[in-house]
Amino acid sequence: MTGPAHDPILVVEGLCVQFPTPAGVVKAVDDVSFTLARGEVLGLVGEAEAGKSVTGRAVLGLIEAPGRARADRIVFDGVTSFGIEPAATRPVRGNRICLLVTDPLRAFNPVVRIDDQMIEAVRAHDDVTRPSGRARARAGLVKAGITMPDAVLAAYPHQLDADVGVRVAIATALVNEPDVLVADEPTATLDATVAAPILQLLHTRVRESGIALLWITRDLAVAAGLADRVGVMYAGRIVEQGNCQDVLVRPAHPYTQGLLDSLPAPYAPGERLRAIPGARPAPWALPDGCAFRDRCAFADDACRVVPPVLAVGARGHAVRCVHPLLSLY
Amino acid sequence: MTGAAPIANPDALLELRAVSTDQGAGRAATFWRSGWRGADAHSTATPALDRVDLTLTAGEVVGLLGESTAGGAMVGRVAVGLVAPCAGERFYDGERITDLRSAAARRARLALQMLLADTPGTLDPRQRIVDVVGEAPVAQRLIGRRQQVEYVGLMLNRVGVDPLLMRHRPHEFSAGQRARIGIARAIAVRPRVLVANEFLAPLEITERAQVLNLLADLRLALELTCLVVSRDVATVRHAAQRTVVMYLGRVIERAGTAELLARPNHPYTKALLAHDGNVVPGRRVWATHIGEAPSPLHPPRGCHYHPRCPVALPRCREVAPALVTIAPGHDAACHLNDCA
Ligand SMILES: Nc1ncnc2c1ncn2[C@@H]1O[C@H](COP(=O)(O)OP(=O)(O)OP(=O)(O)O)[C@@H](O)[C@H]1O
Ligand code: SF4
Ligand SMILES: [Mg+2]
């Protein structure tokens, strides 16, 4: 496997997102940093409420008041800080950085035909005629593996099957040939065998056209197959990050290990699973120190005080734990 | 098919024989799954069941493996009596269920319990947990009304929910806790058969592991027989001794789980088993798949899988293959077995 050259198109450092709620301030994303290179897939995995979607939305400047997003540094294609506010990201959003969400057809206008919406997506960022916009939309659908592009163009969103809908959304997101695609579980509602050719397609497109893909998912098996590197999130923080081999085969963080141990696949049939005890803390009342400490078998007093720092080792394998399961070097 | 009254298989605790449903039953029942993000408006369509056979022997766990359009969830509903089949027979404990008289029919109804995926309507949002779990046992006179609180406490303890919370309502719990409450509600009426109908799918990874362990414990302690309806290969592999694979309303293969995993026969089974849930960097199991999924409301002629099948024969387009025994205890429905 040849990974892509690490010349990042997107650098995010120290991203924090907070939401005031009646129960208290939710630190949905806390000190998240990552880089994304052209032609690279970064998987962002973790369970519900880990902060994966908020991270993805923040990168596109889609956090709206009363939520607050800030970052120490954002570099996009060599230009430092286009900011993380909605206004600052508008010139690149939908054009050079695109978002795909779960059941992505829902993000479409239900009463406007697919062709009008795709042509609109082209013309929003490129001053072309309607016919040439339509031609680009049609070519995009073909590249997304749609066998009857003209029928799809003439359809309304609700007339499409779920898997065709995902392909249309992918075609729309890629129609302007963006540099970065943030995909927030777009295939989560599809069956495995139906999602499979779509994943294959995305993987090919990423490798061929050098798109940088941020792949947000709860499905570790898919992430392992698709991603070059992964970040594991828990309670708003990236607790472990690195290439798939380091993170998903020889994890250093107790939560990553627990997550992998919770999957039944590697066990003998009927064998007892080494499940992580307890439940995740309420997002407005995260414990001090390591947010995982109440469920962690290795926790001691050192884990209670301050949040562990993200220690970076060989090959960029980074872990946020006082007592990592193995040395990073 | 004989004209005489059908005889139950003496080894079976629960048996479905050649059960079919029509499309109407499918639509009527889709509301059970609406609301859960895994089953959105596009995919709630359920196929008609086409002569499905299923046998549960006392004490075993059978997996019903199939994706959202397979009809497995409908089989689960038919198994517990929530949906009446338009053709075919149901037997419980040696008796045809339609022949049972009221007391025995009631016993059969209680003995067959279903675990449903967590959706907003699965647990009545207005009820307190003490009634969610305790109402049926009181109504069915398994316990007296005065014993309800104590009994519910026992049940909640069994499933790992704090009994002190029994005055709370379902929405105050996490999805994992609600799944446990659903289990408590089911076991409170002392069932013999539990049908887990896509029950674990919406849970998070760590919750699912906890609940899988809990169900394994309860199964042994309460001597339950289980039907696990799931689209997750890893879950079925882990939990079930025998596995039945469905595609668009038909059983296409069945065998002991180990045998099925070692020697899958049907091309769809092979394609599905590739998604075994193992976390392997760089393994792209999805490269083998072709075609678009057909609508479950208008299944293709012949073998339902033929438009997606990489090795389909001309005959597959015309004739539905029969389920035939290809090895001891291993049946499959594929025309490729005709020539072998
Ligand atoms: N608009 C909002 N207002 C208040 N809190 C929010 C808002 N959006 C997200 N949150 C909170 O931020 C946290 C992270 O949510 P996020 O959607 O990123 O989780 P996720 O990792 O994507 O999980 P999932 O797997 O469920 O999609 C959660 O606690 C959530 O409740
Ligand atoms: S910092 Fe402590 S509590 Fe947190 S994961 Fe590491 S050992 Fe466990
Ligand atoms: Mg999300």
Image (spheres, helix red, strand yellow):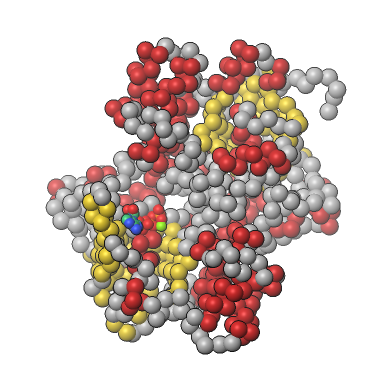
Task: Name the foreground residue: A67 vs A232.
Answer: A67
The reply, left or right, for residue A64 in relation to residue B215 is: left
The reply, left or right, for residue B283 in relation to residue A28 is: right
Residue A246 visible to the viewer = no
- Position above or below: B233 against A78: above
Pinpoint residue B251: horizontal percent, then vertical percent.
Answer: 70, 41
Pinpoint residue B43: horizontal percent, then vertical percent.
Answer: 60, 51
Task: Name the foreground residue: B123 vs A300.
Answer: B123
Task: Name the foreground residue: A14 vs B298.
Answer: B298
Pinpoint residue B68: horizontal percent, then vertical percent.
Answer: 60, 48
Q: How many marks?
A: 0
Query: Which quadrant is home to the C terminus of chain A?
Result: bottom left
Pinpoint residue B290: horizontal percent, then vertical percent.
Answer: 66, 62
- Position above or below: A28 against B3: below
Could you tell me which residue is drawn at 68 percent across and 20 percent down? B97
Could you tell me which residue is drawn at 83 percent across and 49 percent down? B319
Residue A185 visible to the viewer = yes
The reply, left or right, for residue B157 in relation to residue A97 is: left
